[in-house]
Amino acid sequence: MDVRGRAILGTFFHAPTPVALEVLSDVLIEVDAGGVITSVLRPTDPAYARAVADLGEAIIRLPAGHYGVPGFVDLHVHAPQYPQLGLALDEPLEIWLQKYTFPLEARYADLDFARERYQVLVDDLIAGGTTTALYFATQDREASKLLADICIAKGQRALVGKVVMDDPAACPDDYRDASAAAAVADTREVIDYIRNQKDNADARVLPVITPRFIPSCTDEALAGLGQLAAECGCHVQTHCSESDWAHGHALTRYGVTDAEALDGFGLLTRKSVLAHANFLTEPDMDRLVARGTAVAHCALSNIYFANAVFPLRLALEKHLHVGLGTDISGGPSASMFEACRSTVQASRLLEDGVDPALPAAARGRPRSRIDLVTAFYLATTGGGIALDLPIGVLAPGYRFDAILIDSTARGGNIRLFDMNEPAAIFEKILYGASRANIARVWVDGRQLR
Ligand code: GUN
Ligand code: FE
């Protein structure tokens, strides 16, 4: 049922800050006709009883055992890689790209092939609670437009980028931009297409400038895209310092770090998101903070491709903007619940270290752990801040992008028994929820599922 122009009453969890879970018990959330939250009234609020009485039957009431949370913001998805989710995780990044990933992505130039797979992906992500996704499409211009069309039609909030990869020395002949100029022109065309798409008047789907990463682009393309970012003011995404090899590439090519090189091309903006960024130096982090650029932390993918764990605690202490990404298909799960779990787990491995042959004191990096509430904050509020969009928090002025968890679903994995302590229920939900527990999904107050 749509919540647009209506009110919904029940218990919600959200994390407006990294340090505290806020339990909104039996609150009344009012949403305007455009899907924006206008008020969140608690039972102790003087206006509450009156509003509940006035709205009466018009209120949508959550059944017992049901809890609302903000929808997840997946900050890093390779949409065309969905067919190989869970496959091909046996090679290092630079070989994985050439051997499996570029050949799969190249097939999306066939729009029938692309349509069938993109539709399944977007349906699955919505069903899994991802209300906003930051997508890499493929190098192909028309297939990138198609992905945006599908997100617009299905109602998901999305940011879609045509991938730029133009260096003939690094990209396959049958899967690359014909030239730097063509790459920039195609990017511009896709931006204009998405902005003017007739069913996208509310700009729920946004374009993104998307150089794949420095190793697959020429300097001319990177500079052209930096200029375009300044001109059009749209979002930017790329990969940064993901693995030893990727981090080393910029150092060898330019004598500076990946982040510094991207900055030199004008690609670090308030609306830029850098995927992985595991090997950022502390000066790199300070540079990102100064630019307002965010990191998409992809903890599960990093286990396979990164050679290290991103020092998330340090990044947060520096007030770097961070959100979470599944990195489909570098990470073998499309679930943002799983992204929260792997974020906590990776941080524990970083803190304690992993080699039992080392003495405990030399094994890890102290004070690195992240708790579940912070991970949830990153998957919701943090993603919204990274994208500079009013999402991820249940408060006036934010969009009503939310999911409803049915903790009682027999086919799900959450078993609460007689538990009634809200913080414990939240933990059980985050660790236990599967798709069977996701009863409803709303974007802009519109029910998608
Ligand atoms: N670096 C450049 N392209 C990719 C990609 O598709 N996935 C990951 N994980 N890293 C990349
Ligand atoms: Fe990636």
Image (cartoon, grey):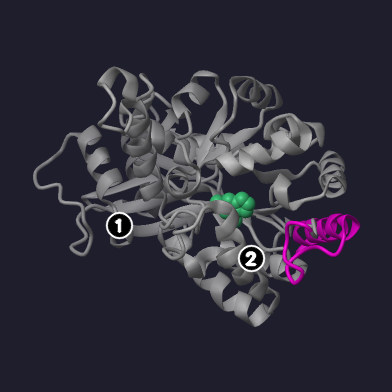
Badge 1 amino acid: Ser
- Dot 2 crowding, Cα within 10 Å, few <14, some 14–19, many 20+: many
Front position among marks 1 and 2? 2
Badge 2 amino acid: Phe
Label placed on residue 434: 1
Q: Please state the extent of the stretch shown in magenta in the rendering.
A: 169-198
> Considering the numbered disc 2 on the image, is that residue within a helix, a strand or a loop?
helix
> Could you tell me if residue 394 is visible in this image?
no
Side (left or right) of 251 relative to 339: right
330 within the magenta span: no
Q: Tell me residue 306's x, y (percent).
A: 50, 43
First of labels 1, 2 by sequence position: 2
**Up/down of 45 relative to 83, above or below:** above
In front: 259, or 4? 259
* Residue at which label 2 appears: 102
Count of marks placed on residues: 2
